[in-house]
Amino acid sequence: MEILTNSPQETQELGQKIANKLNSNLVCLYGELGTGKTTFVQGFAKGFGIKDRILSPTFIMIRIYKIPPENQKSHSNFYHVDLYRAKNEKDAKTIGLSELWQDPKNLVIIEWADRIKKILPKNRTDIYFKYIGKTKRKIKIL
């Protein structure tokens, strides 16, 4: 599925909509800087009832949020991972990423997932972001 969004608000709304249709507990995001990955995650978290301010964990790599009980389907923890500063799969292994996505109670969304493509499990949702114009983005969901 390929979708065009015309504003950051539309990108957030798409994230919220996708959250409600999720089939896996691992979502991998791909795209250059400024293509809307964090904006999408903000909407995605909102789709699970998370009211905390969602910031990119670029310098700490992982932020965890509790999914409110009324919005818990099979997940109770929301992990937002940013691998922009990761050099390779070894960095992901040292922070225990595979343990996070192996636990079915965890929902893990990873920005810059291309950094660890070799170790990603097959059961995941991949989302690609492409810059089209100042506020326009092409988002492809696989």
Image (spheres, helix red, strand yellow):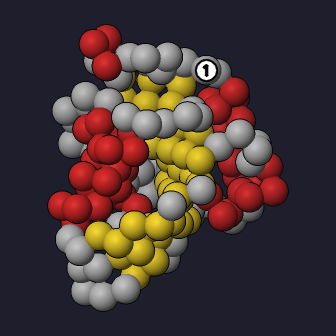
Where residue 46 sits, quadrant-wise, is top left
**Corner quadrant of residue 131:** bottom left
The reply to whether residue 63 is in sight is no
Reply above or below: 69 against 127: above
Left or right position of 75 against 90: left
Instruction: Please identify the residue farthest to the right as the structure is shown.
Output: 118
- Tag 1: amino acid: Pro
On screen, residue 129 versus residue 45, left or right, reads right
Q: Position of residue 45 (x, y in %)?
A: 32, 39
Q: Name the residue tied to disc 1.
A: 104
Please report the residue visible at 59 percent of the width from the left and 47 percent of the height from the top.
125
Residue at position x 39%, y 45% from top? Answer: 18
91 horizontally vs 10: left or right: right
28 versus 46 height, above or below: below
Query: Where residue 1 sits: x, y (%)?
Result: 51, 61
Q: Position of residue 142 (x, y in %)?
A: 59, 56
At 45% from the left and 43% from the top, the residue drawn is 80
Above or below, 70 against 59 in this view is above
